[in-house]
Amino acid sequence: MRVYKIAAMGGDGIGPEVVEAGVQVLKVCAERDGGFTLDFQDFDWGSDYYRKNRVMMPADGTNQLRKFDAILFGAVGAPDIPDHITLWGLRLSICQSLDQYANVRPTRILPGITSPLRHVSGPELDWVIVRENSEGEYSGVGGRVHRGLPIEVAQDVSVMSRPGVQRIIRYAFKLAQSRPRKLLTVVTKSNAQRHAMVMWDEIAAEVAAEFPEVTWDKMLVDAMTMRMVMKPQTLDTIVATNLHADILSDLAAALAGSLGIAPTANINPERDAPSMFEPIHGSAFDITGKGIANPVATFWTTSMMLEHLATSAGYPRRRVCLTPVPHRATADQWEANIEKYGAPTWCEWSPRDAGRCRLCSGRDQSSRRYLLRYEPVPRSVGVGSIDRPTLSA
């Protein structure tokens, strides 16, 4: 039986709460599957660790993580510590050191959620955003001189390399190729950024020749925001630079109903180091410890983790699915849902204070619960939960 070693890192705020819920789901999935087991090791790195040690993680932290098959991450950030310290000291340090250069963020409207967009009920918005995750605007190159003086200067230099651009563009084309619509939009700003972004465009055209079956187009990032809002049905797979995709993926989550339910995967496609899976919501200190943190984004990202692990071992793909049922479901309603979707993997989930559930919108949001199921991925579903997250209606 295959044993997967998982590093569980709750981090800050509600991070430990949602990671704990995700670990519970993963353990039950492994038990139900019977073909693998999961060996979890907890890491206390984060802001509490920083307060004691003045660093977010040990100097050899990323080397410690290399022995794991995957990392489940919660959130990072604390009100009393500057954000650039918490982010660069932990999450970005892990992503860059382990060469997790493909940040994959699927976006769909989940059952029970109402998009803020008119005439968008679900199928019109089914995207996956691929974010370059190792260089670009977040390369970390730059500095400050003459601090505190009238002549102070600061620079953050965007660095793009041909190999770095080639690999992320190629990853995005492969992902688009695996999805039913075979459609890719390359986001750029080459009208104003006349060096690196022009190279980005040229490389996209070169790589496109390798994928004749993929239809692709190019869109300036500012025009892209309008297209996402006005014509969401024209988009499918999207690739953009580190900064551009960071912003666009948050917009995408908001258009799908909530930033709090969106997942992400920091992928090392070559698999020579572990990939990291996390919800994209923040540490949310205002609700920490109240028992109302929504773990659905973590459930979704654990589904991405299971598929990543399965494909790396050549096993049949698996997924975690969510099925909405009424809060006060009758026996007949439960039986009908089980007959339609299969028995739940992990009883049910609902927030302790259902009235503050941020998963659902509308006046009856307190009447929504979700069954969790664990099942094989049908052959008809693309690459599965990474690019077409299978969350049941």
Image (cartoon, rainbow, N blue to C red):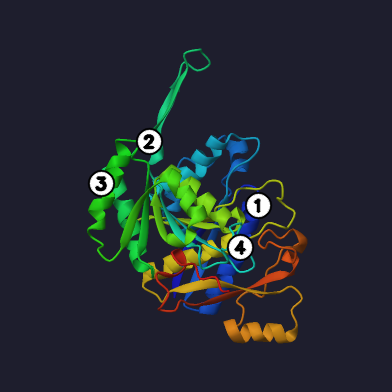
Question: What is the distance, in whole Å, between disc 2 and disc 3 at their CAs?
Answer: 18 Å
The residue at the point 47 percent across, 62 percent down is: 233
Report the disc number at residue 158.
2
Closer to the N terminus: mark 4 or mark 2? 2
Pick the quarter of the image with the C terminus: bottom right
What residue would you read off at disc 3?
A: 202
Question: What is the distance, in whole Å, between disc 4 and disc 2 at their CAs?
Answer: 34 Å
Mark 4 is on which residue type?
A: Val
Question: Is 1 or 71 nearer to us in this picture?
Answer: 71
Q: Are marks 1 and 2 in contact (CB under 8 Å)?
A: no
Asked if residue 269 can be seen in this view, the reply is no
What residue would you read off at disc 1?
A: 14
Closer to the N terminus: mark 3 or mark 1? 1
Asked if residue 308 can be seen in this view, the reply is yes
Q: Quadrant of residue 183?
A: bottom left
Q: Are marks 2 and 3 in contact (CB under 8 Å)?
A: no
Question: Label 1: few (<14), some or many (≥20) within 10 Å?
Answer: many
What residue would you read off at disc 4?
A: 296
Mark 1 is on which residue type?
A: Ile
Which one is closest to the eye, mark 3 or mark 1?
3
Label 2, secondary structure: give it. strand
